[in-house]
Amino acid sequence: MNTGTPLVEMNNMSIAFGGVQAVDDVSVNLYPGEVVGLLGHNGAGKSTLIKILSGAYKADSGEIKVNGTPVTINSPRDARANNIETIYQTLALADNLDAASNLFLGREITNAFGMVNDDAMEAETRKIMARLNPNFKKFGSPVSALSGGQRQSVAIARAVYFNAKILIMDEPTAALGVHETQMVAELIEELKKQGIGIFLISHDIQDVFKLCDRVSVMKNGQLVGTERVEDVTEDDVLGMIILGKQPQRAA
Amino acid sequence: MSQSGTAETAGTPAAPPQPKGFAALGLDMRLVGMIAALFVIWIAFAAFTDGRFLTPRNIFNLTIQTVSVAIMATGMVFVIVTRHIDLSVGSLLAVCSAAMAMLQTQFLPDLLGLGSPFIWIITIICGLIVGTAIGAFQGWMVGYLTIPAFIVTLGGLLVWRNVAWYMTSGQTIGPLDPTFSIFGGINGTLGETVSWIIGIVLTIGAIALLAQSRRAKASHGFPVKPMGAEIGLGVIFAGSILAFIWVLNAYTIPERRLERMFEARGEVLPEGLVMGYGLPGSVLLLIVIAIVMTVVARRTRLGRYIFATGGNPDAAELSGIDTRMLTVKVFAIMGALCAISAVVASARLTNHSNDIGTLDELRVIAAAVIGGTALAGGIGTIYGAILGALIMQSLQSGMAMVGVDAPFQNIVVGSVLVLAVWVDIIYRRRAGL
Ligand SMILES: Nc1ncnc2c1ncn2[C@@H]1O[C@H](COP(=O)(O)OP(=O)(O)OP(=O)(O)O)[C@@H](O)[C@H]1O
Ligand SMILES: [Mg+2]
């Protein structure tokens, strides 16, 4: 693999907040059917990097290509138009609305009169939740009444429902139980088979080794390096994260 | 909010037991509480006034006194739901009222001739434009310039009140156009027959809505309420609507006024004829606005985005919602509703006075908050705000009727506001909202 045009290329991305250079000249890419893990210490700039791709932030410099074509992503709408879906670390749910309203927020199903069709949206939500988290039953409650894991499954359902080509997952399993984490792992495998590319941010190195094809490690806003998981050991990656040093090449 | 991620892994939970009796109606308990509070207030005042408080005449007056604040309160729900506040509504009402008064008494008669049948409609359209434009302008300052709404509208409170003063040189402007004055209440009632027809149309509409919602739920295989509860709800709705119409029809037009009405048409009052006032036009206007605003809140994307933005502005933005433009729209709606309230308020007095709408911002905010709108944003209902306005007005009128001294009236109303919010906080905590 890794031949042909990448699904996404982010070249020389930089962004600063006030004096903080949150992302500093970082380049990463992603191929169809591939999972790329983004690793790094807290505050390394992982979330900021992917928020540029999802339209939440505008980069100071750098170039984004989707399927080899340069694109401008100035807003979350632009990202969605490029089939980029995101599960944010903060989940980005409106706590006062129910699961269906959150799932379809910004893309409501409407009837012939342009009126929001809540029943149709709930029916769709029930369908996708049956696949992702069959134990989920709280369709009538605002998401503030859900557990952390249930909220996370709503955020995952929202990203998966709209047939994303590029999926960004920022610590998608942080609040999930063992069983639900397993289901997300299976989901990632299934999405890979469909040719979807996934950026996965996680602090769990074992998970990353299990699910990812490549890892990109960031430290203090800069890219330490990108490696194929079969070429490195967990210790190598830990060294990259903590010390920012390149793994020793065996010849 | 529990953070335990494994809570839902334990087997499929058993279906919740079907609620029985009153709970089966599935009513919003907050709404039930407010209606109960309203009834307690009414019965208490009736007891202190030998029943005078609950005569058709007083209920009629109560409704027309509530309309102006209630109309603005529906818009304030949207403003507060999006985590803003509008302190300028009373002044905005005044500036719209002043503009409309000047138009219909000075400029338009010169232009179109005194008594032209177009004066009232052109006046109202211009008033709406003024209100909407000022609202949108304030919304633009809040949304795009990111000046806090509290400051923008606090400034607006001073600015617009004094713009109104300047426009009219502080004078009372009147009498207003007779057609325009129809929107004031007592000068524009619909009579018994039309009122009954409207009551029946509203009843049929309410029942059709219940049936349609049940069918839609059933067609998707969602759980529905037991049929008995649904019928019970229909009976409650129909009963309340028709009882309301019946009370308004029971307030009869005094004989002398009736005589004059017939004289004006060149007829003689038939012996023993009794006619009820029926539904005031201003109350019908409020009903229409309540329905439209409820549809906007619940059934349109705009409403969905208003609530989403109030619940989590960042999430709304990340979902592609233009929250800045949304702010402009919310304040523009508020401005338009201030203009409509200006029509009702000035028409009720049949003139524009310099102090019209003074302190209305407090009444409107209080009505929305008593009606369950959370200042933290994201939560609020249109019907709650209208009920809140009715509760406030009931207290005010009731105390006036009982003969409570003016300072005590305000002390009570202020205390009730604080008490109501406290009760609401406790309720929400208990209900886990
Ligand atoms: N909106 C913002 N305004 C100012 N500084 C920010 C903002 N967002 C992020 N930063 C800063 O940018 C840096 C990178 O933050 P980022 O959230 O990308 O880290 P992260 O790698 O996702 O960390 P974590 O593992 O804790 O999620 C941090 O120093 C953070 O303080
Ligand atoms: Mg992060």
Image: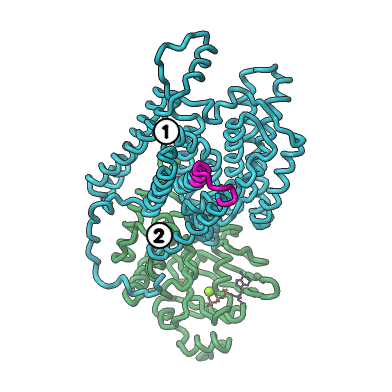
The amino acid type, in three-letter code, at marker 1 is Pro
Q: Residue B146 in magenta?
A: no
Q: Which residues are magenta?
A: B395-408
Quarter containing the N terminus of chain B = bottom left
Q: Amino acid at mark 2?
A: Pro
The chain under label 1 reads B
> In the image, what residue occupies the spot 63% across and 63% down?
A58
Q: Residue B185 placed where, x, y %? A: 52, 30
Any mark on residue A246, and which? none
Disc on res. B56: 1
| Above or below: residue B287 compared with residue A131 | above
Q: Is residue A5 visible?
A: no
Which chain did the renderer colour cyan? Answer: B
Residue A142: image tag: 2
Chain identifier, colour green: A
For label 2, the SS is: loop
Q: Do dots 1 and 2 share one subunit?
A: no
In this view of the protein, which residue sits in the foreground, A45 or B36? B36
